[in-house]
Image (cartoon, rainbow, N blue to C red):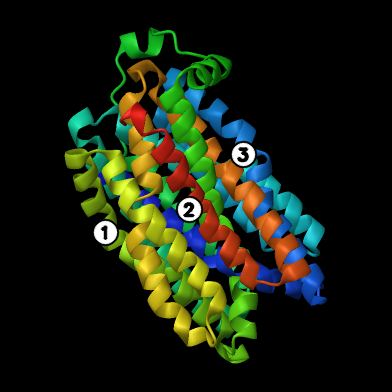
Amino acid sequence: MNVLWIASFIAMIGMNACLPFLPLYVRALGVTDFAEAQRWTGLVYAGAFMLSIFTVPIWGALGDKYGKKLMIVRAIFGLTLAMFLMGFAQNVWQLFFLRIFQGGVSGFIASSLSLVSSTTPKHRRGYAMNLMQTSISAGTVIGPLIGGVLTDMFGVRSLFYVVSALCFVSGIVVVLYVREHRTELDAQQETPSVIDNLRFAWNTPLMRLVLLAIVLVQAGINFTPSIMAYFLEVKGAPPQMLATITGAVVGIVGVLTVLFAPRWGRLSDKHGFTWTLFRMLPWMGLFTMLQGFIPHYEWIFPLRIAIGVCSGALIPTLFTALSKNAPQERNGGMIGLASSATLIGGLVAPILCGVVASSVGMMWCFVLSGMLFWGVFALLRQSEKHNF
């Protein structure tokens, strides 16, 4: 788990060094009309999720059968290639299709979480999953800060080459140091197919509920990042420091997530998952909504701090709820489905955000995002009889 934490941290630095600045890359590729740039940015963000929705469950099932380390290595070197090619994009269409390719070969985080969850005792799984979440969050902190500085200094295109190099280093770490102990019995054991896993999830009320909650929470999380650079620009952020400020606004959430995610994991192990979710979802919704009403960009920082405290309690807790209640032979497949659920949220949210922002204004994107968290809270309250 320690080696995977380091590898995941490096990879997430790479991925998050460029994601907040895709709006600036879209503009650099010739889309200068503001409303059109908002729509295209939503599509480019969503591109990585369009194919991965279908491929991640397949990678999860293959990981159960052939080994999870193999899937981690495949995913990280596929990401290395995709990011390298994005640096050569000549127009927004090429960037869009390369994002789709990135999604098709993705699954690094899902494979890592699956390996950790399958080798961790159930009574410690909440802590382990939330600890892995800190690697994602730590990379989310450092990546945008590095990316913002590099973008303001050298331009956004150079970021993709840096990202590719970081992902390659992460892949080498995994190849050399990650050990997966698979017995001959593990290799020969018949594993459920993707269709079997889908049928099992659909016919199990708890699994169905958790997967739906993951879709909605991830949609709330991914609703506004695609317009954050534009929003901060409108709210008075200096143009010469726009990328750096955007990186700081995105990264500050990761700082608080790193600090609080392990604590939420321990509390979830102790009190149960609903205890954590019922306390954080309403606040997450409120703080997310309030971002849309700030008078100046500086006001967003305290709200982002509050969002960071809450965010570490949501997706990791839902993943742990699913992992703890899945049969061991379906663990990788269920984590794959959970990852697909996050991808569905990530696919729909930025596309819808681009439409809303270009039609009625960016403020309403934050309002709709907050309402999604409140909707999940209401859904789980009504389903509390499942007692997960």
65 left or right of 388? right
Q: Indicate the amino acid at tag 2.
A: Phe
Q: Earlier in the sequence, mark 2 or mark 1?
A: 1
Q: Nearer the viewer, mark 2 or mark 3?
A: 2
Helix, strand or loop under label 2 = helix
Measured from the top left, where is residue 92 in percent x and y? 78, 62
Q: Amino acid at mark 3?
A: Ser
Circle 2 crowding by C-alpha within 10 Å: few under 14, some 14–19, many from 20: many
The residues bearing labels 1 and 3 have C-alpha atoms spaced at a distance of 29 Å
Q: Which residue is mark 1?
A: 260
Q: Is residue 89 visible?
A: no
Observer-side mark, 2 or 1, equals 2
Query: Which badge, 1 or 3, is on the more N-terminal residue?
Result: 3
Q: Residue at x 67, y 70 (%)?
A: 23
> Which label is found at residue 55?
none
Q: CA distance from mark 2 to mark 3?
A: 24 Å
**Relative to 233, is 23 above or below?**
above
Quadrant in which the C terminus is drawn: top left
10 Å crowding of disc 3: few (<14), some (14-19), many (20+): many
Measured along the vertical axis of the image, is residue 184 above or below residue 77? above
In the displayed structure, 3 sits above or below 350; it is above
Secondary element under disc 3, as helix, strand or loop, is helix
> Marks 1 and 3: which is nearer the front?
1
Residue labelled with disc 2? 373
Q: Quadrant of the N terminus?
A: top left
Q: Could you say which quadrant of the image residue 321 lies in? A: top left
Residue at 44% over, 54% down: 11
Return the x and y of residue 360 as percentages of the image width and height: 74, 69
Label 2, label 1: how far apart the Cα atoms are:
19 Å
Label 3 sits on residue: 52
